[in-house]
Image (tube, grey):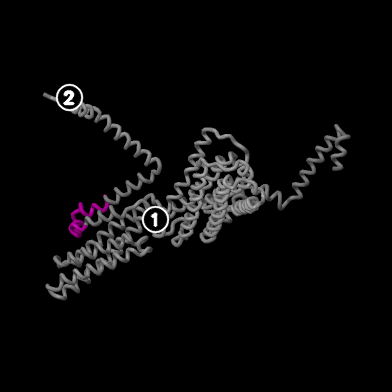
Amino acid sequence: MATPNTNQEKAGVWEKLKTLPKVVKEKVLGICRLSKEIAQDDPRRVIHSLKVGLAISLVSLFYYYQPLYENFGLSAMWAVMTVVVVFEYTVGATLGKGLNRTIATLVAGALGVAAHYLASLSGQTGEPILIGVFVFIQAAIASFIRFFPKVKARYDYGMLIFILTFSLISVSGFRDDEVLEMAHKRLSTIFIGGSACVMISIFVCPVWAGEEFHYSIAHKLEILADFLEAFVREYFKISQEGESIDNKEGDSTDNKSFLEGYKKVLNSKSSDDSMANFARWEPGHGKFKFHHPWDLYLKIGGLSRQCAYRMEALNAHLNSDIHGSPEMRCTIQELCSEMILECSKALKELGSSIRTMTRPSSSDTNVANAKAAVKSLKSLLQSSLWKETDLLSLIPEVTVASLLIDIVEFTENISDSVNELATLTKFDIEDTHKSPKTSQSPHCECAEPGPKTDNLQLVILVEESALALTDTEKSISDPHNIV
């Protein structure tokens, strides 16, 4: 007889089987929704997937097409493997991997053939010993070189391929006398696969790592500016123009999203380093030359992260249960708000300057205003107003003021770095100044070259109005004419 527990287990299994189609359907729909979101977020990801499929299809012809297969044989599969390993999302990453793989294969292949030749001179007894010694030496030296910082950053993949290729060719050559032909076929197929990746990556809807890095740095500065605007609204309950505001539900939601944006900047170091590395591999394109100063972008990114660390502390203080003296907050409110809003304006303009590659016009003024507010705030904090106040109640507000002073300093450093970048890369100065002149040319030309004509026209209008007045109200018009 079946026990109650057995019946319950069978019923549970049956219920799971009944709900299985519904669970599978929900999973499939979830994957479809996620795929749609990823594709809509950046349609270039779909294009990249199609490019990879196209590259693999092209190099597969070396295996499917009989005349090509007769020339390369099974070595044609190295072309397919090269495409799978080398093809990356950006042009710089693809070029970096492709050149690393090709050069490493060429050098390692030549050294492997030379090692095989030297080992064969020692006879059948000494050949395996010498090959083993050569493999050990090159693997040990290459593995140690991989620890060098610059090699690790740019050539780590090439060192791995060097170790692999040298070992395969030198060891395989011990059993196969046609080692030179094998090395030639492998190098040829790898070159073909790498060339297909590079050509498709560059000429079919290219995604430039340098351009991505450029816009990401600009976006970081805009994120920091949004945080400062949100912070001044939340902390001092004032608007951008310095007026008091009442938090609405929509505004509070926007503020919270802006107040969390700094986290993207905090976690951006690894992506910045990789994008700068990939950008260095790319050829000149558009306004980005081959020797574009990517180190300055890294410097600006580092300064923006320093700002973000201070903003994290400000956000933690904003959410803290410990509150300082309300009188102290009211006293420093005006100067702190001025510092925050001026830094926000400066960061927004600097971000826009990088994005459009135009020299900033008023960021230096904003920074100067913020520094003037810092000087006044320091004088206020050093005054004798707080002698009779409990020091513990002043700590939260003084901490906020100190963090804001640091942010002003980093904003000034960011401004100097952006100005240096604008000088080195020759950001558009004349075009940006010419465009407003052309759009406002009627006003400028009338105001400067021919001011007398405008003044005469204005005088005539005033006199006509005065005459009209004298006809109707002579007693009022005479004083106006005198004036």
Residue, disc 1: 274
Indicate left or right for 57 with 224 as reference: left
The kind of residue on which mark 1 rests is Ser
Which region is colored magenta? 57-75
Q: Residue at x 23, y 27 (%)?
A: 15
For the residue pair 27 and 185, the one nearer the viewer reads as: 27
Q: Earlier in the sequence, mark 2 or mark 1?
A: 2
Q: Which mark's residue is nearer the viewer, 2 or 1?
A: 2
Quarter of the C terminus within the rendering: top right
Question: Whole-percent x and y of residue 17?
Answer: 21, 29
Q: Is residue 246 above or below residue 225?
A: above
Q: Quadrant of the N terminus?
A: top left
Tag 2: amino acid? Pro
Identified at 80% across, 40% down, the residue is: 462
Q: Please say whether residue 437 is visible from this viewpoint.
A: no
Horizontal placement of 361 versus 66: left or right?
Answer: right
